[in-house]
Image: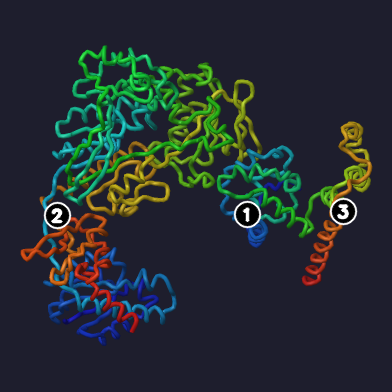
Amino acid sequence: MRIGVFVCQCGTNIAGTVDTEAVARRAMEYADVVYATSYVYTCSEPGQQEIQRRIKEMNLQGVVVAACSPRMHEPTFRRAVERAGLNRYMFEMANIREHVSWISTDKEANTRKAMELVHMAVAKLRFNQPLFSSKVPINKRVLIIGAGVAGIQAALDCSDGGLDVVLVEKNPSIGGKMAQLDKTFPTIDCSSCILGPKMVDISQKENVTLHACSEVESVSGYVGNFKVQIRKKATYVNWNACTGCGECVRKCPSRKAPDPFNEHLATARAINIPFPQAIPKKAAINRDYCLHFTKGKCGVCKKICPVNAIDYDMQDELVSEEVGAIIVATGFDLFDHSVYGEYGGGRYPDVISGLQYERILSASGPFGGHIRRPSNGREPRDIVFIACVGSRDASVGRPYCSGVCCMYIAKQAILTRDHLPDSNCYVFYMDIRSPGKNYDEFVRRAQEEYGVQYIRGRVGKIYPRGDRMVVQGADTLLGIQVEVEADLVVLATGVEASAGAGELAEKLRISYDQYGFYMESHPKLRPVETNTAGVFLAGACQGPKDIPASVAQGSAAAAKVQALFARDAIETDPQVALVNERTCVGCLKCIMVCPFGAIQSKTLRDGSIKAEVLASVCQGCGLCNATCPPKAIQLQHATDNQILAELNILCA
Amino acid sequence: MERVHTLAIQATSDPRFIGEVERASGQQISHCYQCGNCSASCAYTYVYDYPANQIMRLVQLGQKDIVLTSKAIWLCAACQACTTRCPCNIDVAKVMESLRVLSRQEKKVSGRDIQLFYDEFLKLVKRFGRVFETGLLPLFGMKAKKPFTDMDLAPRVIRKGKLGLIPHKVKGRKHVEGIFERFEAYCSRREKDKG
């Protein structure tokens, strides 16, 4: 083989601490190397042209570039050698930047290490084989998990682009957290008035299949061809018949069921429709509270239903869907403030979360939009808001900023002063974070126009005095302790990853950070992609986000799916396992270890049993390669011979 | 200490002081982001010259003199409310304790009486193995030249049986005395090494 070596200087990034000329000179001594040079920016246009020119001039059959991490430029150089007529897998990269020049200033040692890495790459390249990818057709349907505002936006954009959409929502209605909000910042427009039309759109789109009260059970397959099992939870109401008239809800005698939509400020009936604008507007039975299920009697809803939709014998149903891409938009949950013992640990009825206050403000909420204290139903006069509850607090494991609380308490304070002009609003804050369009102006308005008293300091404790609460905090600007007597305390509870986010991530084989937020493929340049091809992210499941950002990500993820589906087929990665049938003994250990179900057994005409790899399912992890006793199964482009060739150099 | 109105930061900052406090307390001072929760939770902010969060801030700015001569560090009751509430997991009470030690080492204790009280208190502990209140208060009162302070409380406390006329017998008072002697020997050795 005739091999060319190109050692990149990367300006001074590499050349500063590695003698690239010496590395190139030494490379000439390695077996099969016929050309070696050092170049200032190998990834630049002239740098790539140099490689191509040398391939043609010197009849090179393989190329090694010693430069940055293959994660940066391996695709660039593979395309470059391909343009010069070589197979793209006749190329190797030695990482002498991240692994050498950036981590040590010892030029001599660096140069030695760089030489060894280049030598290893050359040794491996001598065993490289041209590899060719195959094409698999794309199933142009998209699954969207979670129907909050991000998922809804993604679904609408995909649907408008002519794609079939499968939308899965855990709750009985779509809308997510935004449906629970009263107004939105910084425009104070009604949340359900701007979300409602989008929700209705979803229900009217012919190419959107909505599975509410459903969860993803399992996911198999790969980009272009995912198979998804969806569990439709039993609602004990036949939704094909139910008209959402609400007659059953009005007549249900069990009135103590929890009401998660109202954040447990009120109770619901055992058969319930969560809110008037619910989509789908269908009733569902909570069997833990239904008298038919708990006591074996009642049956009022069944008797009264005009369309005979009640079905007490309903079971969970598993639905299979085949899709080509998945958008994850599972949103967030609110931090549970009961871990703060100093704020009452959840014992004081008049110390509530931000979302609970949102329900109190809402006209469809438990008090019909009148601000009342949950304890005695009276109108509060003094209302204290406390920022950063479960945000920027390492002591409760939440060191990050939730990003939305500063804005939502400003909004709630403005709404409070609007509803109750005689009330006094106090906001305890550490810093105000309002870096959005018209956001800081909005916070200023709360202070200047609405007379909300902002106090810079955290709150040390809340304790009852009479039927009011004493909020003891600091005014760090004055350097003194302050006390505010309050009728109602609203905690700006922070954003955390949605419960069960980790479980879903494992089903989808995507990664998540230490707080449970899904990891994007690149924090700046690939914000809605994951490291699993064909799985995209939208909204707060990736990190705390407000409505505009969630909507933008919903659209972005939809655009990514449409770009993926613009092709009719996907090229598969040929770096997968391959069985040498002559040496395979048919023990089938590989089938047992394969995490992706990519290996199956087959019987040859002579009756012998052999393993067979499904190239389109194989992810190239190499577990089978390591397990195979006669080494009959080999991971292409990382075969035993290639790895041993590298090791031989390293240990020589 | 008079409150400072303009602080020439470069001229007054002693960057080594931050390291000293961190070594003595085992806490990383830069972790404090000045939320003020320590001051909000502190039972004695009302008598402090600098509330707890300002003490932390002064340490961050390397203001050795202001911190070590402050009254706040001596009025701290070490109740640990600040430590419990700190969202940054800083043991603020430990920092205050370390500042008291540094203040004594640097001979910067504000107010003669504070140092005097601690000294008299410890002298009695050394002698009797625990404090002897009936001895301590008159002794401190005489030396501080305010012999009648708190005298009015005596009859009430005596009636409740809180003040004994003779010191309590404590087991192992020799051992306690031994602790003091070893510590004093250690201090004088260190003084000699320094000198």
Residue type highlighted by circle 2: Ile
**Which residue, given by chain and number where applicable, does mark 2 sit on?**
A570
Q: Can you say whether B117 is above or below A146 in the image? A: below
Residue type highlighted by circle 1: Leu
Which numbered circle lies on residue B61?
Answer: 1
- In this rendering, which labeled residue sits more in front, label 2 or label 1? 2
Tell me what residue is drawn at x 94 percent, y 45 percent.
B142
- In this rendering, which labeled residue sits more in front, label 3 or label 1? 3
Name the residue furthest left. A605
Q: Chain of mark 2?
A: A
Q: How is the image coloured?
A: rainbow
Q: Nearer the viewer, residue A219 or A560?
A: A219
Residue B145 appearing in the image: no
Q: Quadrant of the N terminus of chain A?
A: bottom left
Which numbered circle lies on residue B123?
Answer: 3
- Left or right position of B66 against B192: left
Residue type highlighted by circle 3: Lys
Q: x%, y% of residue B109? A: 79, 53
- Secondary structure beneath dot 1 equals loop
- Secondary structure beneath dot 2 equals strand
